[in-house]
Amino acid sequence: MRGDLSFHWDFGELPEPGAEADVLVGAGGRVAGWSTGAADLLGYQAKDILGHPATDLLHNRPDATSLQRRTETGTRQLGPVALRHSSGKRIDADVWVRPMTSATGGHSWLFQAARAETIRAHEFGRSLLRGLFTDSPFSIDVFDTRLRFVAHNETQRRSGVFRGSDFTGRTMREMAPPGLLDMDAFEARQRQVLDSGQALIHTEVAGGIVTGGIVAGGPPREYVWSESILPLKDRSGEVMALAHAVYDITQEARSRERLALVNDASTRIGRTLDLSRTARELADVAVPQFADFVYVNLLDRVFGGEEPVTGQPLEGMVLRRAAHRSVLREGELLGAVAEGEIDGFSTVPGSPFTTALTLGEPVLLSGDELYAALTEFVPERAALARELEVHSWLLVPMFARGAALGTAVFVRFQNPRHFEVDDVLLATEFVARAAVCVDNAHRYGQERATAVALQRSLLPQRLPSPTAAETASRYLPASGHTSLGGDWFDVIPLSGARVALVVGDVVGHDLHSAVTMGRLRTAARTLADLDLAPDELLIHLDDQMNRFLDERSAEDLQRGIAAGATCLYAVYDPVSRRCVMARAGHPPPAVLSTDGKVSFVELPDGPPLGLGGVIFESTEIELADGDLLVLYTDGLVRSRERDLGTGLDLLRETLTQTPPSASAEDVCDILVDRLLPEHGRDDMALLAARIRGLPEDHHVTWSFTADPELVAQARELTTRQLGEWGLNEEAFVAELVVSELVTNAIRYGSEPITLRLIRDRNLICEVSDGSSTSPHVRRAEETDEGGRGLYLVAQLTESWGTRYGVRGKTIWAEQALSD
């Protein structure tokens, strides 16, 4: 190399990686070669430094002797050396030297220098490469543009996928086990990066099910990887290769799945307070995300609504199927045990069910262990399990408040993954959640059964069948509530073949409302026995309601319990065919006449019960035989989406479309089906009465003056009428009753005096007069000449009583008729 030769030194692969500057020093100690890196580092151009003494490059010339000695002794790394920049600035650099001999035998030295920070960066780079290609947990591959393997790191070399395989120059499609990846999608991602030059970072890739596992001898499983594909470009920017960084995130993905299942269970299980539906929700959550078949068995006591027991041996306790769910069609698997039936596998002493409930711990069985248990306890189900190739069976006991409730069983046969420890923990987690909900549903069921019994006891168990009306009723609780409510209805037989029809509505849907309703219904029946007019009866009910309100506690006042009630009371007389009614804040009754016309009774709207000091007004209407009277509470016509006016229009329209000859039962069904919304409604009471008047020949009326001699005439008329009715056997008692009542009216009453006989299911005798004096039954002394009349009437008849009209009173007595 000539000293005056100016050239750019390009070594390709440098002898000492990381060097920034290369300087060739000849035998005379002069600079013989100068690289562009040296120019960048020290500021000298080749033409300015070639041929000059190398010592000119030292910041301290006295260091030259030491460097020369160390160079001659063969030291390769000279260590830190202070160099001088062309500007005179000091540059600290590490320097290496390599002796060189030319073809002619001449000696020279190649000096290489790099600043300290460059050396550190180089070391970081080497550490990075060592970490990526030697110690990294990532599998790193390099593919050429034809998607063939070029290189891979030690992690990939050690992995079970390519262990011991020579795959350089081959594609992933040629090397990967069957089912490992969707190769079309994989190569599409590679080509996308080749074409765009843009990296694909952190693509989550789900691997297929690999039979035998990726690792030799491992169980079948699914894999999930995080994949990044990076383009490797040359100096011109062209993509020359692809680098793949892949990390197995299967466990992380499984953890996310399990967390999602727990969250799903927390929102989907226990949405209702229905026992069977809660068990079904548990099965729905687990299939197919967690298991291929799930069934929930509950202890017979829990299934039947009884209180679960604690601290008692569970051996021999019966488990009944509450719910199940399968990935197969109905009948392929579920036919083994139907819902509601006893699970025979669980009843055998020593079965896994007894073990799990006794120890309070899950039981996990492999396929062979399950086959053995089934063969021992229920052989008929072992064949089904083998046919389905069940390989993993998990039983989790269900406890709440320290009491055993039942079990949940999870089965896998299509999903190739076996249940793992984390799966057992997950199943235990949402079974515990379900246990709380099942316990709540069970306790709610008990409370609801009590509520239903209370409600039924407060409502009429069976409506009477008066001659005056064919009646039918319906009661439905509010949607979303228990069966407790404040609506009620009643049919009350009255004297004179009359009948009272009542509907009422107490505010609220709780125990207090139901109790208040029961008290009001009892009060209404008691007041009805006094034969009060409808408006008077409502006044007394209003007083009763005020007493109930005065009895409320401070807590009840704060909660607004039973703060009021509405009521409609109607009395129909089949003899006169007149109906008198009054209402207290209640919707008006509807009438469907025999000609198909529908009308609402124009009835004065009194205020609700409980305000006090209110006067109610009554209205009297005439009803023809066959007319239908419909009484109801506002739950039938009003809801969250429908106001009262719209509801009444819909009621009118529905009744108009109802055949006038339809029975009262059919009318109730039609109204409930067409008017009641599924959600957002109040509780509802409905009472329909098909009116029937008494035939003209079933009643007769006579008038008398206040003449005692007319008593005999009254007896004669009675005997004659009973003969016409064919009631000769009842004539003797009837004569005594008529004689006594007419005598009392003549003696103690005032004109006008009337006698009416009514032939209904009983023989009814009514004597009316213009006086309001009330008779009383008393036991006459032995020396008394009279005073035994009403006593005899009470003894000879089924019932008797007094009712008051606008003017005067009526004393009546009912006498049973023989068959």
Image (tube, rainbow, N blue to C red):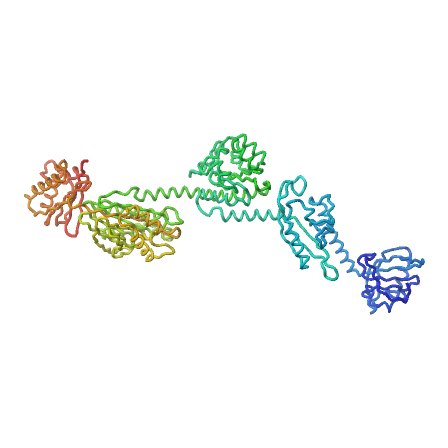
> Relative to 121, is 269 on the left or the right?
left
Q: Is residue 796 toward the left or the right of residue 481 in the image?
A: left
Q: Which one is in front, 25 or 611? A: 25
For residue 49, say whether it is visible. Answer: yes
Mark yes or no: residue 404 visible: no
Give the total number of marks visible in the rendering.
0
Coordinates of residue 82 in the picture (x, y in percent): 84, 63
Residue 345, position in %: x, y?
A: 50, 33
Q: Is residue 398 above or below residue 73?
A: above
> Is residue 125 or residue 68 the one in the foreground?
125
The quarter of the picture where residue 602 lies is bottom left
Classify 367 as above or below 661. Answer: above
Q: Quick one: quadrant of the C terminus?
A: top left
Q: Is residue 281 left or right of residue 787?
A: right
The residue sitting at 6% across, 46% down in the picture is: 707
Q: Quadrant of the N terminus?
A: bottom right
Spot occupied by residue 374 in the image (x, y as percentages of width and height): 54, 32
In the image, residue 573 sits, relative to residue 113, either above or below, namely above
Most extreme residue toward the left is 709
**In this view of the protein, which residue sits in the foreground, 346 or 695?**
695
Q: Would residue 442 be found to the left or right of residue 218 on screen?
A: left
**Percent coordinates x, y for residue 385 in the rendering:** 55, 35
